[in-house]
Image (spheres, rainbow, N blue to C red):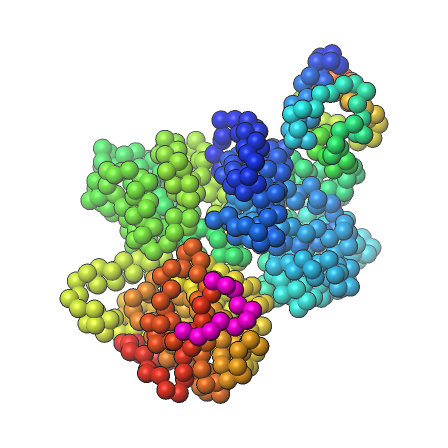
Amino acid sequence: MDQLLWLAEHPDLSAAIGEAKRQTDPLARLAAAARLSGYRRDFTQTARLDRLATDGLRAMVRGEATVSGLRPLRIALLSSHTVDHLVPAIRVAGLQRRLALSVHVAPYGMYRQALLMDDPELADFAPQLIILALDARDAPLQLPLEASQAEVDAAVAERIEELRLLWRRARERHAAQVVQQTIVPADPPIFGSFEALVPAAPYAVIDRLNAAIRSAAREDGVLLMDLAWEAARGSYGDGLAEPLRWHQAKQLVSPNLAPLYGDQLARIAAASLGLSRKCLVLDLDNTLWGGVIGDDGVDGIHLGQGSASGEAFLAFQRYAALLARRGVILAVCSKNDPSVAEAAFEHPEMALKRSDIAAFVANWDDKAGNLRRIASMLDIGLDSLVFVDDNPAERDIVRRELPEVAVPELPEDVADYPARVAAAGYFEAVSFTSDDASRGRNYALNAERKAALSQATDMEGYLRGLEMVLTATPIGAAELARSTQLINKTNQFNLTTRRYGEAEVDRIASDPRSVALAIRLADKFGDNGLISVVLARPDAAIADDELLIDSWLMSCRVLGRQVEEAVLEVLARAASAAGYDALIGEYRPTERNGMVAEHYPRLGFVQHPAPADAASEATFWRYELTSTRTPRHFIEVKA
Amino acid sequence: MTEAEVIKALTPVFHDVFDDDSIVLSPEMTANDIEGWDSQTHVMLTVAAEQRFGIKFRTAELESLRNVGHFAQVIGAKLEGK
């Protein structure tokens, strides 16, 4: 089956792998594997890329080396079927999604024991993600075919309780995020379409079980690898569960489908670290409508009801609009006269409105430069962009100039664009909150704020005029998902760049001696949503009356608005109330967080000796809660 | 295709699966002669051969495979029948 169709084809991938193998430096081989993983590849090429990366990945896992652009993550795979043949493809897909994965596979079929009996190997591995990959043949529910719906539901409920126990163990013992794979039906129908009307028919039981898994996962904060749904949609062609591979090797997923399976797992792993893409950048002519707006005019382009191709373009616009509703930022990058391009949005059948587009760039400059401009307008990285353009030449140039930007290969027909963009999994989510739903609007408002700043004559007047209100709340269940999301995606304004899963954040936040704050900011233009997180906790390496600021990070959307000063005010107040006499701030430099190197001294902290066990490059700073001046800002604080 | 021709066509499949361009196949070769030829790579090898030749092995055929020559004969017979 053809797979990974959104990746570009390499003229000769096998030769390129052979060439890369000859490099002696393991990190150079790893970098080559990471680059080549972005091309369309079958399972043998994928396995070869994995071998190419092995030594470099090992060095990274042992902490002997780092490769810029690759984030380490440990995944444990606990399964009821053979998964060893999938591991190379998982690692290579990880590279393609900017992860340096180490994968631990528990012995085949031993997933319960691994979790319930405290498997020491698993504990040593310290997984951050635990994947429970189960299948329909594993401990089938023992039900007579004539069992009633109530009996089926009781058996399903019992199985769900067992799963929940495993999930709880994974969280409590390993502080790991759990990913549960849904169950792919194994038996062909025995009743035909009548199948689902018989409560205990094999398909009906699995269907019920999957529905119960999904709702339990939602309640317990477990992520899904919804393999049953993917298989039913035909993502794997008709070959996911080939009977021969099961009989031969107890493989649920055929080896030739490993690249797709690996990618579907890796995209969830990447999303859990906040590495999903954020912004869909759209070309205009022949991408959002048929024809050339500059030549054909608003009345001449193909869009909307009345013609099949007009409807196909409309369907793609609708899909983009749906993505915007769930928090994907939309931008336009088009070679066009700006006023002509804007005028197209007055077409009565446009599903996308001009106000849906947070950054609109239409000119005659090259697209690579314009994509850079869009990233800077939106204050996001190039590695957050997905660029959709019908023109293969433009796609090729952008891939070459800006390898960080994801550029999907597109099918010939725009009717197939939505499915292709969806299949690529660029925007995989691990949470959905009301903030996501209003994100596009926030980014558009920020552009207006920037315009307001350029008009304001003095900074103080601008800041006062924003009428900012900051709200700080202790991180509880309501803020956990969003806070974790921000902790994992913030790179620049991040003092320590410590990455935590929900379970770990919860552990810090629920300690009564800690101060864990979720901070929101509103202003006269609207609500910015959650923009900053502070985790402060006592630490054995410092004095009892000192509170260590473990993590302090902020969205760059609200830079330069003295939010830091207001946050310090809230933090100082909370720390005093908890009986502390001083705050200890820590700065751990990374490639990306240079902007906060002077954060603590700027806020009035004084340099402090590093505790004995601190990382060598980290600096420490102290802030007396009793005597220090109060920070100055123009924000109304609600805590 | 003769057995020799199939073996010639199989060679790049072996090179890819074992990631080793130095492998030279001969009919008597078995899993013991090639480093890394275990039950997992065996499945990969059969799937890669299926893709290369556009054929499908039967469960029983996979169980009876003795050596490279026999593997090539089974493939050759399937290609005849196509």
Q: Residue A176 at what x, y percent from top left? A: 62, 62
Q: Residue B34 at what x, y percent from top left? A: 75, 29
Does A437 sit above or below residue A289? below
Judged from this view, the residue extending furthest toward the left is: A457
Total tally of numbered discs in the picture: 0
Answer left or right for A20 relative to B73: left
Quadrant in which the C terminus of chain A is drawn: bottom left
| Residue A409 among magenta residues | no
Q: Give the range drawn in magenta.
A: A607-617
- Residue B13 in view here: no
Determine the residue positioned at 32% across, 46% down: A372
Answer left or right for A399 relative to B72: left
Does A119 sit above or below residue A369? below
Question: Which is the main secondary structure of the residues drawn in magenta?
Answer: loop
Determine the residue positioned at 71% across, 37% down: A242
- Residue B31 in view here: yes
Q: Residue A198 at what x, y percent from top left? A: 73, 52
| Residue A610 among magenta residues | yes
Task: Between residue A595 and residue A284, name the one nearer to us.
Answer: A595
Q: Residue A368 at what x, y percent from top left? A: 33, 40
Answer left or right for B17 relative to A597: right
Determine the residue positioned at 71% across, 21% down: B24
Quadrant in which the N terminus of chain A is drawn: top right
Does A598 sit above or below residue A411? below
Task: Between residue A168 and residue A573, name the one nearer to us.
Answer: A573
Determine the residue positioned at 23% across, 38% down: A364
